[in-house]
Image: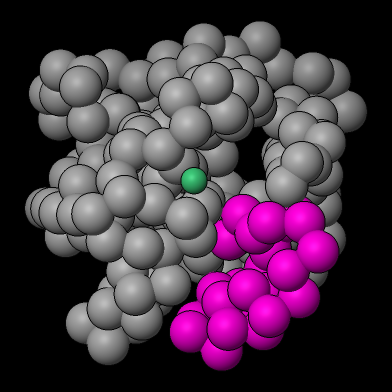
Amino acid sequence: MRVLVVEDEQQLAQQVTDALTNQGYVTDTAADGEQAHYMAAVESYDLVVLDLGLPQLDGLTLLKRWRTEGLRFPVLILTARDSWHEKVSGMDAGADDYVTKPFHIQELLARVRALLRRATGHVSATLMCGDLMLDTSQSQFFYQAQALALTSHEFRLLAYLMHHQDQVISRNQLTEHIYAQDQERDSNTIDVFIGRLRKKIPAAYIQTVRGLGYKLTQPNA
Ligand code: CA
């Protein structure tokens, strides 16, 4: 899952992106509203963490613009303490949730997980597909209750498929959601990662849909 962090305070932006990366998300950052607007137009994000006080274009205006343009990704806004009106205008502008600065990073991570679950139609923190389980609170996969050892790319790929199970996902879509903007991308490597995952869980879980992509599904379901 890929997250855009829009925050002009460099230290905070770094802290948030480090925490998200540790949890297995791929992250990009934007330090002003115009840059964020551009990035969301050209890249594919599953969620945006948006500070409201930004240079160039403020967060509220940016959020309204995104919603007018039809961008539907969940948006978690960062609001100032004691500023209830920011929360109200943020939610009314199309935000899905907020955290108040200063916040504990664990709270932000929990809200990110909840928003991503809801956006993909899941209600529980534990995603199941047959004997395969993703515990989103630990960022850990289990197969038949045994923890799986996955590289960060394998984890991102499998987590994306898990959130979108029973849907056909193209190689391009996978590429867009597992690499950050500054990483080199090659959609052929997706096939390599899929090959490795099929050795770590029964191959039947990941179906190849010829000409379209891949689908994670419960075998014989
Ligand atoms: Ca700010």
| 96 falls in the magenta region | yes
Whole-percent x and y of residue 202?
Answer: 58, 29
Q: Position of residue 14 (x, y in %)?
A: 51, 21
129 lies left or right of 180: right
Give the residue displayed 48% in from the left and 32% down from the top: 9
Quadrant position of residue 175: top left
Q: Quadrant of residue 70?
A: bottom left
Query: In this orientation, which residue lies closer to the viewer: 173 or 212?
Result: 173
Do we see residue 101 in this rendering? Answer: yes
Q: How many marks?
A: 0
Give the residue displayed 27% in from the left and 78% down from the top: 65
160 to 106, vertically: above or below: below
- Residue 1: within the magenta? no
In the depicted view, which residue is nearer to us: 159 or 210?
Answer: 159
Please give the range of residues in magenta: 77-100
Can residue 197 be seen from the camera position used here?
no
Q: Compared with residue 99, is residue 104 higher up or lower down, i.e. above or below? A: above
